[in-house]
Amino acid sequence: MASTMKDIARLTGLGLATISKYMNGGTVRPKNKKLIEDAVKELRFIPNEFARSLKTSLSRTVGVVIPELGNQFITSIIITMEDMLRKHDYAVIVCDCRTDSKRESEAVSFLVHKRVDGLINMPTDQSGEHLKPALEAGIPIVLVDRMLKPMNGLVSAVVVDNVDAAEKATHYLMEAGHEDIGLILGNESIFTSQKRCEGYLNAYTEFNIPPRDELIRFSDYTMEGGYAAMKRLLALPKRPTAVFVTNFEMTLGAMIALNEAQLKVPDDISFIGFDKLDLFGAIFPNLTLVKQPQYAIGECVATQLLRLLADPHAERQHQIITLATQLHVGGSTRGIRKPS
């Protein structure tokens, strides 16, 4: 039979009020604290977290809803967030919605019924409708990587400067003489895809060069999607001299397509990928890459949620934090001569 606080009281000689205060995070005398901790170990006492949550209205859990758990960028963010939240005694429940709006809505409702204290979401549904149950329950929300316009003022968010990231990469290729630059993006309705496309087009405007619509390919942020998008670019009558791919998985797929076509980087085509992760160094060394600060993103998301959880009035001051990216120049791009 599981031990109870009454068993701890009998073993320590302390009152239930003192033990309950300690169990709920209150301050007790150092001598009493040691007695309770020793008794907990001896009795192998496991607190009833559900009963505690009913009394305190806190579950000490945070819900996380993401589109794809297999996405390396997302995984690295979750690991950082969880480490920080765990240090503040919060457990994390992760729900993978498989980039499905219906599953995403069901995941949010599930977490609300699980009485999570806070919610972190990398949204698939761009309307924000899926977040209404959490908002109505007064659960603070922090969005990751993607902001939703309908949620302005209602949630906090941590994003990167996607416009600047794409503009820097495209600008770098244009400085090297490239005008026909392929762009592989994620889903057209997603905030990050829209902003990265905006940055790409900004560079064309700056150089006063008309962009070719057929060089812009929307995909689905998967390796298979990147592969298919690159195949379509290579099949064009006038194929691009350079390609910029805007996430890790699609970068892998695009490079596989280039290998199948027996095209050498950068001799036959220049290439800029996205997200500088360790795996790249082993598979495709020395790529030119846009690096997102994934660890800083995870830290900022956790910090924002902890701020909202600590101050019941903080939700009136929701923040959108924008982090910078870096362009790491490798050996996958080269200059070309413009026709005279």
Image: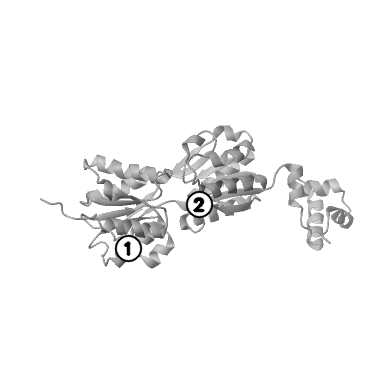
- What amino acid type is highlighted by mark number 2? Pro
Name the residue at 87% across, 53% down.
6
Determine the residue positioned at 12% across, 52% down: 339
Colour mapping: one colour
**Can you identify the residue that label 2 sits on?**
67
Mark 1, secondary structure of its residue: helix
User: How many labels, in total?
Assistant: 2
Q: Is residue 25 visible?
A: no
Residue 105 at x, y = what percent?
A: 56, 45
Q: Is residue 65 left or right of residue 272?
A: right
Q: Amino acid at mark 1?
A: Ala
Residue at the spot of label 1: 257
Which label's residue is closer to the chain start, 2 or 1?
2
Secondary structure beneath dot 2 equals loop
Taking the image as drawn, is residue 23 in sight?
Answer: yes
Marks 2/1: CA–CA distance: 25 Å
Asked if residue 109 is positioned above or below residue 288 in the image, the reply reads above
Q: Nearer the viewer, residue 271 or 39?
A: 271
- Which residue is located at x 19 percent, y 55 percent? 336
119 and 189: which is toward the camera: 189
Residue at point 57%, 53% (across, down): 95
